[in-house]
Image (spheres, rainbow, N blue to C red):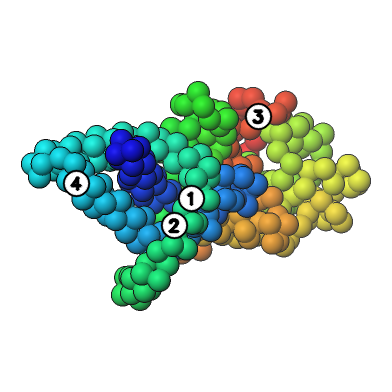
Amino acid sequence: MEYVISFVLVVLSALFSGLTLGLLSLDSNTLSRSAKHGNKDAIAVYPLRSKGNLLLTTLLLGNVAVNTALSIFLSGFASGLMAGLMATALIVVFGEIIPQAVISRKALWFGARTVWFTKAVIILFYPIAYPISWLLDYFLGSEMPTFYSKRELMEIISEHEDSDNSPIDADEERIVHGALQFSHMRAREVMTSAENVTLFDENQKLTDDFFEKINSCGFSRIPIFSGEETNIIGILYVKDLLIEDDDISINQTEEAFERSFLTVGGNDFLDVVLAKMLKRKQHLAIVKNKKGNFVGVISLEDIIEEILQQEIEDEDDYEYDLSSLR
């Protein structure tokens, strides 16, 4: 009979010890997200884990009570020194080390399958545990949620991609990294600088030579200047040239030339530029410096490429001599 009671007390000690480490190691925010996505184990454990101080107090009270009972019980049929050595060995090895090592590796799985035990213990120790947990909540406040910096999130994504147990692949890793980084980049870092931008004067005639140049550059939107190339006055929409008359100047077109255009600063962050483009429904923006001088253009494609971390190429992307288009 003594062995049976000792065994039961050691098992209870192991449960209290293992559950204390295992359940308290689970992040409540992570459990909440998993529960929302239908994880049955998270659904079972989250209500207990969300009351962290009550759970901690209950499990510690149970662990102390069981370990004390084990020491007292062993002293009843063994000498004081022998009882102390036996209790210490049983508690440390079988009541602490082994259960904590095992349960910590499968904390959610084990916690979900012993939730009935944990609830029963909470009810049993509630008169003592609740006042203590209330004081902890009052003086220490609720648990601090776990938040990650963007660099940490990127590292987490990389670790998942490297793991054979994760469904995240290299393309998803690249895109998530790009999405987390692009908002810190400025328009001047991504734009096509003014000296590399294809421009036309507003008085340019719609001649065969002009259309040949348009076809060569492969752009669907082209900035138009008046007088000096730094004086941008509008955007030419190439697709609308199909309905225009021949041999008229760009500023005489009815549909293709739009004088209203989006302007952004070279120091504007890409997320701000993207928001402006989406709001104005513009795919191209003229970039100006602090002095208001034209320094380049930035397209919606440029921003998407930064998010995707990959260049978007189409059938019109090939090398050509920009100077021949001036």
Q: Which residue is mark 3?
A: 313
Disc on the earlier residue, 1 or 4: 4
Which residue type does callout 1 highlight? Phe
Which residue type does callout 3 highlight? Glu
Q: Are marks 1 and 4 in contact (CB under 8 Å)?
A: no
Residue at image point 58% right, 56% down: 273
Q: Which quadrant does the C terminus fall into?
A: top right
Q: Are marks 3 and 1 in contact (CB under 8 Å)?
A: no
In space, the residues marked 3 and 2 are separated at their CA atoms by 63 Å
Q: Are marks 2 and 1 in contact (CB under 8 Å)?
A: yes
Q: Which residue is mark 4?
A: 76
Q: Which residue is mark 2?
A: 121
In space, the residues marked 2 and 4 are separated at their CA atoms by 26 Å
SS category of the residue bearing label 3: loop
SS category of the residue bearing label 4: loop
Is residue 192 visible from the viewing direction of this image? Answer: no
Taking 72 as reference, is 308 left or right? Answer: right
Q: Which residue is mark 1?
A: 117
- Which of labels 3 and 1 is toward the front? 1
Taking 237 as reference, is 277 left or right? Answer: left
Taking 258 as reference, is 177 left or right? Answer: left
Disc on the earlier residue, 2 or 4: 4
Disc on the earlier residue, 3 or 1: 1
Taking 116 as reference, is 154 left or right? Answer: left
- Give percent across and percent down for residue 233: 67, 59
Which residue type does callout 4 highlight? Gly
SS category of the residue bearing label 1: helix
SS category of the residue bearing label 2: helix
- Give percent across and percent down for residue 82: 11, 38
- Neighbourhood count class around disc 1 (C-alpha, 10 Å): few under 14, some 14–19, many 20 upward: few
